Amino acid sequence: MASIKDLKAWFDRDLKFAKWDESILVENSKEEEIAVRFYTNVNEYMLEAQQREDGHVYVSGTARSRKPRAGMTTSRVRQLLPTPRPLNAHVWRRILGAILGLELVRLHRKEAAQPAAEASAAPSEA
């Protein structure tokens, strides 16, 4: 059974260039409940962990775009986990994977763009 202290330790262990004390905004911190926010250039992440009567700590998380999309007045919210899950190392890895998946940028491969560029640059034979 993992605790909120484990969550802090995993954060510091797994994120090489970020530390809990420097990168996390703690909004609500009690011994049995914590709500934290952290930010990237594009998104705001919110993790909530609370200890239930059965002694297990359950965690949920959301990601919110920091800027709304064009034509929208509010930013989009996405769930990092489908439902609150008991906190353990596997769930922590799922959260990290969800964050990485949201932050990845699609690459446009050079070889895929080259044929179109070469076709438009070739002189026409008329």
Image (spheres, rainbow, N blue to C red):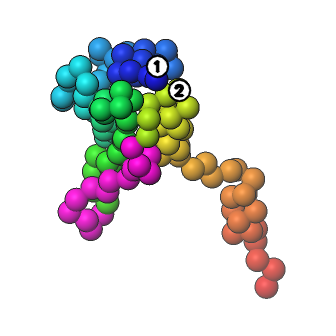
Nearer to us of marks 2 and 1 is 2
Assess whether mark 1 and mark 2 are in contact (beta carbons under 8 angstroms): yes
| Mark seen at residue 89 | 2
Tell me if 91 is positioned left or right of 40 in this view. Answer: right
| Depth check, front residue: 121 or 41 | 41
Tell me if 11 is positioned left or right of 89 in this view. Answer: left
Q: Position of residue 95 (x, y in %)?
A: 47, 37
Q: Can residue 80 be seen in this view?
A: no
Which corner quadrant holds the C terminus? bottom right
Q: Position of residue 123 (x, y in %)?
A: 76, 71
Secondary structure of the magenta portion, mostly? Answer: loop
First in sequence, mark 2 or 1: give its number: 1
Q: In which quarter of the image is residue 61?
A: top left
Q: Position of residue 9 (x, y in %)?
A: 42, 15
Look at 69% across and 69% down and name the residue there.
120
Look at 44% across and 46% down and name the residue there.
81
**65 vs 89: above or below:** below
How many C-alpha atoms fall within 10 Å of the one at disc 1: few (<14), some, or many (≥20)? some
**26 vs 70: above or below:** above
Q: Can residue 95 be seen in this view?
A: yes
- Whether residue 58 appears in magenta in the rendering, the answer is no
What's drawn in magenta, residue-wise? 70-84
**94 vs 89: above or below:** below
Amino acid type at image mark 1: Trp
User: Mark 1 sits on what residue?
Assistant: 10
Outermost residue toward the right in this view = 125
